[in-house]
Image (cartoon, grey):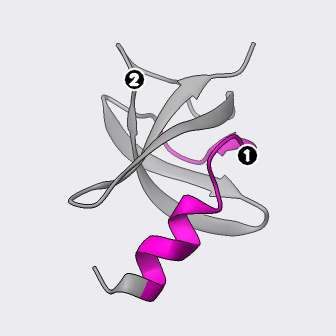
Amino acid sequence: MEEAEAAELQLLLGKQGEAVTVLRPIGTVRIEGKRFDAMAETGSIESGQNIEVIAVYYAFALKISKNI
């Protein structure tokens, strides 16, 4: 991952969005109209569930929690 990409991902911390696919624990989310690969914090997150970015990992991308 390039430094510019990593910096862009850091700006997503705390942002909310929606799961595009089921995260078991890995899947795709949409935040501010863009799609990102992501990993669920625990368990799985169903498609359509509201989510929040809680961490950014250099090796993977975004760590996501359900936003209830």
Quarter of the image with the C terminus is: top right
For numbered disc 2, what is the local secondary structure?
Answer: loop
Rendering coords of residue 66 (x, y %): 61, 20
Secondary element under disc 1, as helix, strand or loop, is loop
- Where residue 63 sits in the image (x, y, percent)? 42, 39
- Pick the front one: 14 or 36: 14
**Mark 2 Cα shell of 10 Å, populated few (<14), some (14-19), many (≥20):** some
Picture quadrant where residue 3 is located: bottom left
Q: Amino acid at mark 2?
A: Glu
Residue at 26 percent of width and 56 percent of height: 60
Residue, x 73% and y 44% (percent of image)? 17
Which residues, given as a range, are shown in magenta? 4-21
What type is the residue that disc 1 sits on?
A: Lys
Graded by Cα atoms within 10 Å as few (under 14), some (14 to 19) or many (20 or more), the crowding at tag 1 reads few
Q: Is residue 11 left or right of residue 32?
A: left
- Which quarter of the rendering shows the N terminus? bottom left
Tell me residue 56's x, y (percent): 42, 50
Residues at marks 1 and 2, CA–CA distance in whole angstroms = 15 Å
In terms of depth relative to the viewer, which is nearer, 36 or 58?
Answer: 58
Which residue is drawn at the image coordinates 58% and 65% (left, top)?
35
What residue is at 45 percent from the left and 80 percent from the top? 5
Q: Earlier in the sequence, mark 1 or mark 2?
A: 1
8 lies left or right of 2: right
Residue beneath label 2, please? 41
Question: Circle 1 sits on which residue?
Answer: 15
Q: Indicate the position of residue 44 as horizontal and vertical percent values.
A: 40, 19
- Is residue 64 highlighted in magenta? no
Q: Is residue 54 above or below residue 3?
A: above
Q: Is residue 65 left or right of residue 15?
A: left
Q: Nearer the viewer, residue 32 or 58?
A: 58
